[in-house]
Amino acid sequence: MNVKLVVLLSILLTVSIGTNIYLLQSINEHKENNHNNVEFTRNNLTQANKGLSDPPFNNSISNNDALKQALSPAMVANDKTAEINLLIAKAEQLFYANQFIAAIDHLEQIAAINPASSHLITEQWLSAGNQWLASRKFSLLSSFLRAYLARFPFDEQWLEIKIEWLVAVNKPSAAIDIYYDLIANAFNLEKEEMWHQRAHQLFRQHTNALKRQKAWQSIVNFSKPVLANETNYPPYQLVLAEAYIHLNEIQAAMNYLDNIKYQEDYISQINALNTLIDSIVLAEEGIKLVRKGQHFIVEATLNKQHLSHLMIDTGASLTVISTAFYKQLLSTDLIKTNRRLNISTAGGNETAFSVVIEEFWLAGRALYDFEVVVMDLEGLDKADGLLGMNFLQHFKFEIDQKNALLFLTPH
């Protein structure tokens, strides 16, 4: 055989073997890099950034076109690994430098290349957001929320963190609005129900706090926009009705109550507010009194059928009826003695007893199981007894002596 031919074949064989060995090593390196990429993202971002200053490999390894074509997939893979690691390191650096818009730009690029790495970074940022919330770093959290939600406005996890932040900075109305935005975009019945419950709970907490402060106008200002989100929810209507009653805007209150008058689950609350309205209306009109010298007499009905005339006595702790009027009650009612007691009078101490009246009614105000003392009352001109403080204490009361009117307003 020709010596030159043998030498040439030997050279070609050597080149072929070397090419195959290099290609195998490159492919193995690519597999190992991809396997370690996610762990690398989590634990060694700084080292990754440092190590990416050199190119992944020298493109001048071979001038052989066939060899370059064979190595092309490995080269692309290594390039992507280098790119993703560089983006990850940069995103983390920007995030912790509070350059949130640039960090989110990098996150989007990472998501396009490697969603798993993007997910891990997002989880780390969520953890940081919760730490900011717990440590009340509200300015930092607000800056990130503004940047992130401008790019991803329907991200549920960050929206829930924003709700907690808004509650913490006393902006419950804005927080409730976010719950209703989540409901509108949920398309998931279980989530919708959960967010409805949370919105309702937050509404109750805030309105109850305002009620304790008697901040009725603040309740109206808070509740009306919330009602616009869920117009058929009766508790919103009830809260507004109660607030308007205390603001003495009776017609507005009645309109809200009229909207829910057929809601059987809320009938007791509706009735209570209607009774409150009646009391206020009656108080504005005033209760007519009969003047007797320096005293005033008012009419009251006992057990729905016995009309009495009682002299108002703010110095009497208990309401009193005369023995004569008590006998009138006994003609139609079975009334048992409640207790024995000693009564201090101008003439000294007297022994008396009390009874319980099932319904004590005075100008539209009714008290039930009402204690009344029975005793002899001499010299009480045209009166059946005394109206004492155990009735009056249930109201804010005022006597217009000039016009002989009694005004009773619920506490």
Image (cartoon, helix red, strand yellow):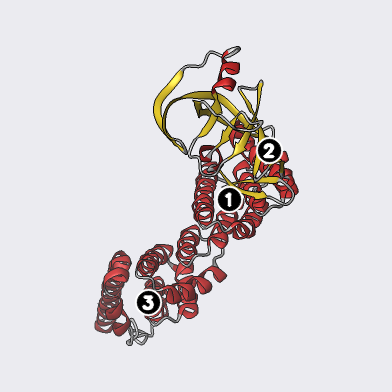
Left or right, residue 50 beside residue 266: left
- In the picture of the structure, the residue carrying the numbered disc 3 is 92
Q: Is residue 289 visible?
A: no
First-in-chain label (2 vs 1): 1
Left or right, residue 62 beside residue 163: left
Q: How crowded is the residue under tag 1: few (<14 C-alpha within 10 Å), some, or many (20+)? A: some
Q: Height in image: 182 above or below 94?
A: above
Q: SS for tag 1?
A: helix
Say what amino acid the circle numbered 2 marks: Ile
First-in-chain label (3 vs 1): 3
- In the picture of the structure, the residue carrying the numbered disc 2 is 260
Say what amino acid the circle numbered 3 marks: Glu
Q: Nearer the viewer, mark 3 or mark 2?
A: 2
Q: Is residue 142 visible?
A: yes
Q: Height in image: 368 above or below 62?
A: above
- Give the spatial CA distance, label 2 vs label 1: 24 Å
Of the numbered discs in the image, which one, if any, rests on residue 26? none
Q: How crowded is the residue under tag 3: few (<14 C-alpha within 10 Å), some, or many (20+)? A: many
Name the residue nearer the viewer: 330 or 152. Answer: 330
- Give the spatial CA distance, label 3 vs label 1: 32 Å
Please tell me in which quadrant of the rendered image residue 53 appears.
bottom left
Please tell me in which quadrant of the rendered image residue 326 appears.
top right
Say what amino acid the circle numbered 1 marks: Ile
Q: Height in image: 78 above or below 386?
A: below
Residue 54 locus on image (x, y percent): 32, 87
- In the picture of the structure, the residue carrying the numbered disc 1 is 183
Residue 3 locus on image (x, y percent): 24, 82
Residue 1 locus on image (x, y percent): 25, 77
Q: SS for tag 2?
A: loop
